[in-house]
Image: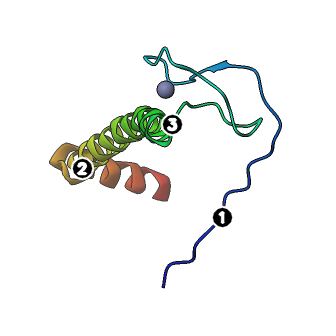
Amino acid sequence: MKRETKKRQSNRIYTLKKCAKPECEIEFNPTDARQIYCCRQHQIDSNNDKRKIITSHQADFDKKVKNNRKTLIKIYNNYLYKKKQYNTQNSFRL
Ligand SMILES: [Zn+2]
């Protein structure tokens, strides 16, 4: 069951605005003072582009964390590291 929403439009006439999507050159008459895109699709496109930038930064960070973890595991399992750690522990016992 989908709830129907009725959009309320005021009778106020706003001045023409340029669409906030960077590539869009359309000037439109907003139906609400907060409206910054000429149409719903441009709002979706613009928000997807913004999210894509954030997601790519997050993906880069996750990749670096994953590589760092692999490196730390390699170091931890390395024979020389284990030997040095053993020697360090022994030196504390003195
Ligand atoms: Zn637009």
Q: CA distance from mark 3 to mark 2?
A: 66 Å
Q: Is residue 94 visible?
A: no
Q: Position of residue 52 (x, y in %)?
A: 39, 36
Q: Amino acid at mark 2?
A: Lys
Return the mark for residue 83: 2
Outermost residue, right side: 12
Tag in front: 3 or 2: 3
- Ranked by sequence position, the earlier of labels 3 and 2 is 3
Between 28 and 51, the one lying in front of the other is: 28
In percent of the image, x 49 and y 38: which residue is there?
47
Q: Is residue 21 left or right of residue 32?
A: left
Return the mark for residue 6: 1
Q: Residues within 10 Å of mark 1 (few under 14, many from 20)?
A: few
Local secondary structure at mark 2: helix
Q: CA distance from mark 1 to mark 2?
A: 72 Å
Q: Is mark 3 within 8 Å of ligand 1?
A: yes
Q: Which residue is mark 3?
A: 39
In percent of the image, x 48 and y 53: which residue is there?
92
- Ranked by sequence position, the earlier of labels 1 and 3 is 1
CB atoms of marks 1 and 3 within 8 Å: no
Colour scheme in the image?
rainbow
Q: Residues within 10 Å of mark 3 (few under 14, many from 20)?
A: few
Q: Position of residue 66 (x, y in %)?
A: 29, 47
Q: Amino acid at mark 3?
A: Cys
Against 81, residue 60 (above or below) is above
Q: Is residue 90 left or right of residue 66?
A: right
Q: Position of residue 7 (x, y in %)?
A: 67, 57
Q: Is residue 82 left or right of residue 45?
A: left
